[in-house]
Structures are given as structure tokens and as C-alpha cells.
Amino acid sequence: MRVAKVFNNNVVLGLDEHGAESVILGRGIGFQARPGDPIDPLLVEKAFVPSAGTTAERLAAFVDEIPLDDIVLTEEIVAVARAALGDHVTRHVLVPLADHISFALRRAAEGISIEYPLSWEIATLYPAEVAVGRTALEIIEQRRGVRLPDLEAVPIALHLVTTQFGTVDIGTTVRMTEVLSEVLSIIRDEHGTEIDEDSVEVARFVTHLRYLFARERAGRSANRPGLQLSEPVRAARPREYGSALRIAALLDEHFGWNVDEDEVLFLCLHVTRLTDEPTRTAALTGPAAPTTDRPLIA
């Protein structure tokens, strides 16, 4: 590993033998260093790889402003999140999450409180991530003796949701959350039914939409076999099918997605699960219908 650029005495841009860049943090690692100099591995304390949409310069600016102790604390939280949520929680979330936690600790020390928009929606739509966020607050209290407000579990959860999509752009995840909430409102309003946000059906629907979002961002197809059930389902469930079409139009309006007919069918089946009795839903889908989203979204 050699120095490609010196940001300051403690942060440099490193370049390995394959040309891969990483931001290297270490006390004195940039002192009197020049591009092309070898990096002393004994001085390396942390290394960070820029993620999609983040330049090395921006990443280095983040790293330089975050105390090393806060980065170490966040590493522990990311490890817990990865164990609880899965491999999509990568090290790319480490720097933006550490930046948030460091700022939250500074706010707590200064007695500053803050409100987060969409707190109810985030807690409802991403319960697993919020649960990890609450665990993170316990870890912070144990390591630092500071109890952050319970509401801080919300932005932590939002960072963990965002990393699923291979980005650090929380703004995009906020937009997705707003759309998910609007989708549920469409179903409530059009069918005059209450939706239990804690139900398995809602969890499956939200998971389906999140994977749809991830697929569309990555430009991947669902790789499903054609089910050729559109006409029977349209005839049997015209209201639910109409809701699915309106949801597809909403996704197109917000994100420019061309939701295909097969996807509309699956949206219709989810709407049916949310608005119908379980036994009637089972009768509609039948034994050959998929019972979980995961095979549908691979």
C-alpha cells in the first residue's frame, strides 16, 4: 500500500497494488508523507473503502472529523447489526453512522434535543432495524455512560435500512419511507379497512417493496417464471388489482419505475392479504402460489 494523496497528518489516501483506493487513518501517518511513499502498516489504525456515490475526499473529511473512539464504538454496533440483520450491513455504513453517533454524543453533552421526521413510520415499517437501534443505544450507554434519547434509535435504523441499497444516501431512504407510508394509506382509503402495522402480512408487504426498491436501484429483474395469472386475478379481485395498479403508478411517479404486469400481480396478492380474511386469501392464492417474498425477489 502506497500513499496516493495526503489529506492531513492523520489521514491519507492509500492505493494498493491492484489500484484500489482506501482512506487510511492513523496518528502521524501523513506527516511528511508524499505521494508514492509506502504506508507503514504499524501506523494504520483504520482503513475505509469509499462506497458508491462517496468520493475519497468526502470520506476523508468525514473520517478526519470523527474521534477514533467513536469509530471504534460504531464498529461494535455495526457488527451487532450485521449479526441481527444480515450481510447487507456492510462496512460502508460505518463512517456515516459513526458521524451521526459522534454528533449525537456532542448534542447530548450540550443538552441539545432534536426531533426526527417520519419517526412513527420508520418504527412501523422497519421494526428489526429499530430494534437494533435500541440495542445500539444500550451499547453506547455501556461504553460511554451516556444515555441518548430513545428517539435516536430512529436515525440509526435509517442508516441500517439505507445500507441495504448499497448507498449512504439517507435522503433516498426517507423518500422510500414516505412512499411506503403512502402505499399503506392508499390501501386503507380504498378498502376502508384498518391495517395492523404489526402483522405478518404488513411485514411481508414492506419486505417485498424494499426488495423491489433494491432491485430497481440495481437495474435487476426479478427472474421470476411467468405466472400468467393476471386475467384470473383481475376478474376475481378487481378492487385489489386496481389498488395494485395505483401503487405501480405511484412508484412510477416517484421513482420512474416501469412496474411490469407480473409485479402488479404480486402487489395485488399482497393487497389481498392485507384486506381479506386469511382463509379467503388462501383460497385465492391456492397451494401453488408463493407463500414468501424471498423466492420472488432473488
Image (cartoon, rainbow, N blue to C red):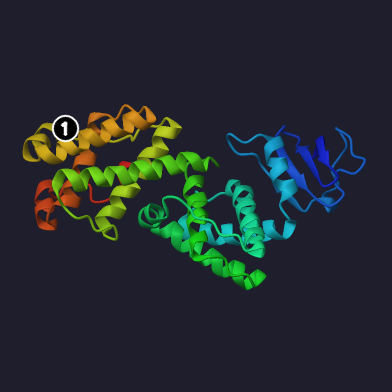
Q: Secondary structure at mark 1?
A: loop
Quarter of the figure with the N terminus: top right
Give the quadrant of residue 257.
top left
The part of the image, by quadrant, that contains residue 237 is top left
Residue 215 makes an appearance in the image: yes
Query: Mark 1, residues whose alpha carbon is within 10 Å: few (<14), some, or many (≥20)?
Result: few
Q: Is residue 198 above or below residue 1?
A: below
Asked if residue 225 shows in the view, the reply is no
Q: Number of numbered discs present?
A: 1
Is 175 left, or right, of 145 in this rendering? Answer: left
Report the front residue among 107 and 295.
107
The image position of residue 121, as x and y in percent, is 37, 52
The three-letter code of the residue at mark 1 reads: Gln
Taking depth in this image into account, of 243 and 117 the one nearest to the observer is: 117
Residue drawn at x 49%, y 45% is: 162
Query: Residue drawn 21% across and 37% down?
Result: 244
Q: Residue at x 47, y 39 (%)?
A: 172
Give residue 154's position: percent from left, percent from top. Answer: 47, 56
Residue carrying label 1: 228
Measured as percent of width and height from the top left, residue 214 is found at 42, 39
The answer to which quarter of the image holds residue 245 is: top left
